[in-house]
């Protein structure tokens, strides 16, 4: 009888233990969903090295969503609205900021003081600059054409079908060109677009397609950045492609990152922004062929092939929105 009771007690203990819920032995994985433009997400973009480095340091898994160009990234978040899965939006330019700013939360990063003061365009810090650049036309020095020295030079007959532009409706680079022509040419800016509509080889939908046509030899001049030749020097060991510095000045652009309002991954979002303002800063700038936003970031010697124009323009998002209406009614009618 005693033996039978002992066996029953053992069985009771086993059953009791088995009935207890299994405790988690592994901490819940931290994640972050990042919406970014295609060139950042591609094989040659910063994400290929930046994201693994961030994940290794922080233990945060990044769900990277390639969403087209900068305009398309913004439109995707706007379309999804409160149902968006995006935690952080990456690559919003200063002249497009008004479209998305109301969907973002402020973040007082401890590294804000390291930024160039002149590029901090949002005092509420809902959009934090991670790099900046200057729009310019890049030309193929082996093309045999004479080097143009101004925007108006491009309208000459000798450059017919030799220039690739970018659409301001679909690309932040195209928006930059629109702002550039307005700031440099004043009230005649639409006349320039009318002339170039006939003179240019094409008006591409985005930077990637435009620059691809350029490097494939379809045209010897393309809209890009003063820093674009840096890529060719560092990765192809060639100075064949060079920046055209124009006498009528150039438009500057600032790229920023922001945290989506109501995100459930606020801590992870802050960690990502802090990372790209510190360890990721030079990697991001070099891979993007842009300038770092942090004052003491040291760039490679190849940046000597990125000339800085004497005159730089900057424009507001409100102005860009107004100009786009005029451009659409006049050029894209």
Image (cartoon, grey):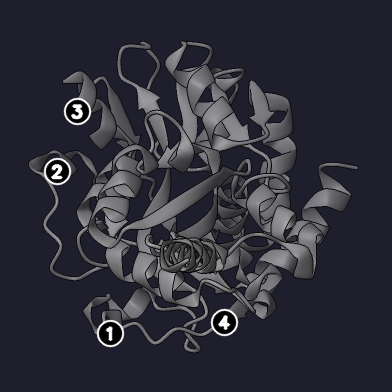
Q: Which is in the foreground here, disc 3 or disc 2?
A: 3
Real-space Cα separation, disc 2 to disc 4, in angstroms: 37 Å
Front-most of residues 161 and 117: 117
Alpha carbon distance from label 3 to label 2: 10 Å
Is 292 left or right of 194, judged from the image as shown? left
**Residue 70 image point, x, y percent:** 59, 50
Q: Earlier in the sequence, mark 4 or mark 1?
A: 4
Dots 2, 4 in contact, CB < 8 A: no
**Position of residue 185 in the picture relative to residue 80 (left or right):** left
Q: CA distance from mark 3 to mark 1?
A: 34 Å
* Residue furthest out toward the front: 1
Residue 162 left/right relative to 48: right
Q: Which residue is mark 1?
A: 110
Marks 4 and 1 in Cβ contact (< 8 Å): no
Is 83 rendered above or below residue 329?
A: below
At label 4, counting other C-alpha atoms closer than 10 Å, the crowd grade (few under 14, some 14-19, many 20 or more) is: some
Give the Cα distance between marks 3 and 4.
Answer: 39 Å
Mark with earlier residue (2, 4): 4
- Of labels 3 and 2, earlier in sequence is 3
Answer few, some or many: residues within 10 Å of disc 3's Cα (few below 14, many 20 plus, some between 14 and 19). some
Q: Which residue is mark 4?
A: 105
x 66%, y 73%: residue: 98
Q: Nearer the viewer, mark 3 or mark 1?
A: 1
Q: Which residue is mark 3?
A: 233
Q: Looking at the image, is mark 3 or mark 4 nearer the viewer?
A: 4
Q: Which residue is denoted by mark 2 in the rendering?
A: 304
Residue at left offset 28%, top offset 64%? 275
Mark 3 touching mark 2, by CB under 8 A?
Answer: no
Q: Quadrant of the C terminus?
A: top right
The quadrant holding residue 170 is: top right
């Amino acid at each position: 009888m005693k033996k039978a009771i002992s066996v029953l007690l053992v069985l009771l203990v086993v059953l009791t233990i088995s009935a207890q819920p299994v405790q988690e032995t592994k901490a819940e994985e931290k994640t972050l969903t990042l919406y970014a433009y295609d060139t950042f997400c591609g094989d040659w973009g910063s994400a290929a090295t930046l994201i693994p480095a961030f994940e290794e340091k922080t233990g945060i898994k990044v769900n990277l969503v390639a969403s087209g160009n900068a305009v398309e990234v913004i439109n995707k978040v706007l379309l999804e609205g409160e149902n968006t899965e995006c935690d952080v939006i990456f690559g919003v330019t200063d002249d497009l900021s008004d479209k998305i700013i109301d969907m973002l939360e402020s973040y007082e990063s401890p590294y804000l003081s390291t930024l160039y003061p002149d590029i901090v365009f949002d005092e509420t810090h809902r959009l934090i600059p991670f790099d900046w650049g200057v729009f310019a036309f890049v030309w193929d020095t082996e093309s045999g054409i004479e080097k143009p020295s101004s925007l108006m030079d491009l309208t000459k007959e000798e450059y017919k079908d030799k220039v690739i532009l970018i659409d301001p409706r679909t690309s932040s680079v195209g928006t930059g060109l629109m702002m550039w022509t307005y700031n440099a040419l004043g009230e005649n800016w639409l006349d320039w677009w009318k002339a170039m509509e006939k003179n240019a080889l094409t008006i591409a939908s985005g930077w990637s397609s435009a620059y691809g046509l350029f490097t494939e030899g379809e045209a010897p001049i393309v809209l890009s950045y003063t820093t674009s030749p840096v890529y060719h020097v560092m990765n192809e060991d060639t100075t064949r492609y060079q920046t055209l510095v124009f006498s009528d000045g150039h438009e500057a652009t600032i790229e920023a990152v922001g945290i989506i309002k109501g995100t459930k991954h606020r801590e992870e979002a802050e960690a990502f922004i802090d990372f790209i303002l510190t360890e990721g800063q030079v990697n991001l700038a070099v891979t993007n062929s842009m300038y770092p936003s942090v004052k003491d970031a040291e760039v490679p010697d190849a940046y000597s092939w990125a000339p800085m124009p004497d005159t730089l323009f900057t424009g507001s998002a409100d102005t860009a929105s107004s100009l786009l209406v005029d451009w659409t009614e006049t050029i894209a009618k």
